Image (cartoon, helix red, strand yellow):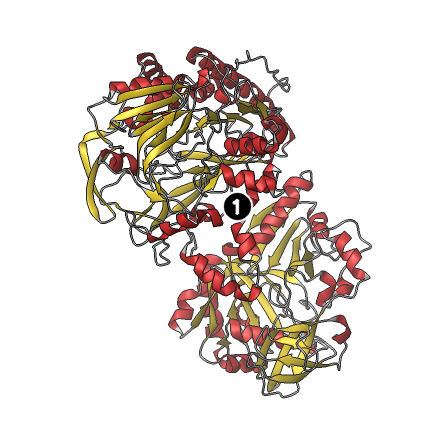
Amino acid sequence: MTMSRQGVQPTEVIDRAAKLRFSWNGKRFSGFEGDTIASALAASGVNVFSRSMKYHRPRGILTADYWDPNLMVQVGDDPNVRAGHRLLEAGMDVRSQNAWPSLNRDLKAANGLLGRFLSAGFYYKTFMRPQWLWPTYERVLTTFAPGGKIDIDTPHGYHDKRYTHPDVVVAGAGPVGIEAALAASEAGAGVLLVEHEHAVGGHLRYSSDAADRAALAELRGALEASDIEVLTDSTVTGRYEDNWLGICQRSHPIAVERLIKARAKTLVVAPGLIERPYVFEGNDRPGVITSGAARRLINLWGVKPGERAVVFTANADGDAAATDLERAGVEIASVIDGREGRRVSATQGSSRAVNAVIADAGLASNRRIDADLLVVAAGWTAPTSLLNMAGDRPVYDAATARFFPSDPPSNILAAGGLAGDGSLDQLRSHGTATGRLAAARAATVRHRLQARTTRALPVAGGEPAWAPDERVALGRDAHPELYRSDTHGMVDYSEDVGSKDLVAATKEGYDSVELAKRYTTATMGPSQGKLETVNTVAAIAEARDETIAEVGTTVWRPPYAPLTLGALAGRVFEPVRVSSIHPWHEANGVTTIQAGQWIRPDHYGDPAAEVRNVRENVGLIDVTPLGKLDLRGPDVPKLLSLLYVNKWMKLDVGRVRYGMMCAEDGVVLDDGVTGRLGPDHYVMSTTSSGAGGVWEWVENWLQTERPDWQVHVTPVTTAYASINVAGPKSRELMSRVTEGVDLSPEAFGYMTVRSATVAGVSGCFMWRIGFTGELSFELHVPAGHGLGVWEALMDAGRDLGVGPFGLEGQRIMRLEKGHFIVGQDTDGLTLGPSTGLGALIKLDKDDFAGKPELAWAADRQLPQVVAIQPDDPRIVPDEASQIVRGETNEILGRITSSRFSPTLDRSICLGQVEPELAAGGTKLTVLLISGERISATVIDHHAHFDPAGERLRG
């Protein structure tokens, strides 16, 4: 097989004036702008691109497109690049994969000599026993793992996400898809057209027929004149409930990939058909290509794929390939017509190239035909993936030798090759009718959504009737069932699974297509069955002596094409958030800690001294990251009663109440306080880490379950700078800077809220709560004034001994007081009653989030959060130290929080223990990280300090 660049072609996509230089396995090569990596290498005479996964057989071009399993290469530090699709760029360092020490001399090809011993299920049979040898097996297998090399130091590329709500999404921009998009747009629908390849046009792009070229120019012109959004080099990777679509855009001008999440009112599926290989001896030898590969190489990139060819054809595409090959100067040694019952039995040659084809050429027996190229057109796979994801199961039509959709949902329309066959004009007409139908049904869905969405604009007119499907059905062209010849060959090129493997698996009892797939790994490689599925089913059907329809097929699940982890993660968007007071912290020797997205003060040099100062004088802590939601409307009490486990219908104006939220499974979700500032005005606080999640939780309930409630929610976390003023002298300090509020204990008691002017700043509010266990005023100031108010407090309290304290000091004091932290002292399994706040859960009120599970938990013995003191007060167990039974390793709980208390001069802890250990006075054994076991005691109350709460009530 000798490939070379030919003369200029009327349909080529390369720019011969723009030469691009690159390297292949360390050697210098060149191509043109518009080349793929594979076409540039092929034009330079390269015919071996990779080694197969298991047997390390040389592999060449097969389909010359995205799905080509033989064209996986390494580009720089990017592994598993699809060379049949990735466009060439100047300076690319391209290398082969899965070969050692080199592509030309791969010592791992010795596996081929052991092929008879590496049959289907080889790994299962060989490496399961003895189990103690598995580490050795693992090391050996790792050296044979296919794929490229990952560099963990590779800089992150920019990835992006987008959300969109088009009326119609058309998957596939061949002639049918383009016509559907144009018709839907003309009918008034907003349309998103998504094409997997680098340009629209489908098979018209690589057709040398003048009428096809004219049709392509016409369609492209109409598309450019429309307002349709077109995404090329993009794939609809998944269809989920209610046409929620994942679209991977690889053509974004900035992002490496962009994941688009689209909610389509109707989806048109028009991906065309995928040409599949033919199974025979030597079908994976370099020089055996599909008819589509031959036409792409010649017409898109001007590459002559060989010198002397045999063409095995069973359809018009194979016939066209023969014509194109001859026009490109390739000698046609023979045309073997599968429609006449003829076949190709084998190829001969070296492992690196074809030099002869053994075929039935209409004679009494097979004959040898000298050739360096075999072009195969044996039939197609219908990529019904998006329809399968919607619940549709394909059905097989033996007359056309392919699968068709059965009964997809009415908001998904199949078009083009998925629906049938026809002339170009017939297919375009079918696309137009499909687009009009999609637009009509989208209009009905749009009307329904708008009419049923609370606070949406009023709809105009009545709901349009659901449009019936009155499209003229496409015909189905007869096609011979050509899957396997009279010899055995490769079925799955990605996984090195041959037809013999599938026959053997069937004989071993793995005769279901789902079982055989998993046992042999057929269809599980990078092509994900696009080329292999039908041949796999056919091999199993033959082995079972049944029809393909009787065997059935596997169905595709998302994603249709692979996405990188970067695309799924989206943009690396980690904003550094600081409060408006942060400049003061930096100027005063703060040591910071990253808490989620926030940079927060951890301490100012001596956390223990900070604690003592708060206990004796007064301290300030910047608590701006606390989540804050402004709630307004007459139905706020209903919302609070729904979200919190306790009661909220009778909270008076000016009062504050603590609440705990549980998820639907009864697991603790968040906690915080909510205060009522006016008749219809409340402010909810959340944990710092829970701010975003609770806001989403609130909106989810309002938008999906209670859209009729009159509640308006505004997140105000960053709108306010928040300062906790804590300590026995806090009231005196606040009295010096506060106007318009009586701060006496009688007028402004514990768990109350007041609006005030502080340090000359109006629009502030503050509440009396005590996370530190001291008399405290939590002050919320408009964010722009945060620094000024903080400095005013520091100036006003100098004679009182005011000082800042950080997160570490706060955590020591909250632990002294026995306050648990959601996510630290609780986890993803901690139910509400386990916190020790079972009395807070009011099962006698109307339904609320988590009530069924909490009612179930009320009668169960659950792990409990308890306060623990090590018997040796000098030992502070590490958090997550296990609580065990005596000298055994039976785990009975864990330490969730631990610190040394400067107030009590001893170590203190919170922990979760089994219910039988929760009573005060119970002795525990704590297993330290060092392996040492220490004794500890559960105390009667969560609070190690001031259990009666006298100090915080002030």
Q: In the image, 208: left or right of 465?
A: left
> In this orientation, does residue 774 appear?
no
**Residue at the image position 32 percent from the left and 52 percent from the top:** 77
> Which one is nearer the viewer's eye here, 691 or 83?
83
Using the image, determine if residue 798 lies above or below residue 635.
Answer: below
> Which one is nearer the viewer's eye here, 55 or 953?
55
Picture coordinates of residue 725, whole percent (x, y): 56, 71
CA neighbours of label 1 inside 10 A, class few (<14), some (14 to 19), many (20+): many
Label total for image: 1
Secondary structure of the residue carrying tag 1 is loop
Picture coordinates of residue 691, whole percent (x, y): 56, 56
Tell me the amino acid under the disc marked 1: Ala
Using the image, determine if residue 739 lies above or below residue 416.
Answer: below
- Which corner quadrant holds the N terminus? top left
Asked which quadrant contains residue 659, the reply is bottom right
Read off the residue under disc 1. Answer: 120
Asked which quadrant contains residue 843, the reply is bottom right
Picture coordinates of residue 141, whole percent (x, y): 45, 57
Q: In the image, 701: left or right of 574?
A: right
> Which one is nearer the viewer's eye here, 483 or 194?
483
> Which one is nearer the viewer's eye here, 720 or 807?
807
- Which corner quadrant holds the C terminus? bottom right
**Residue at the image position 29 percent from the left and 51 percent from the top:** 102
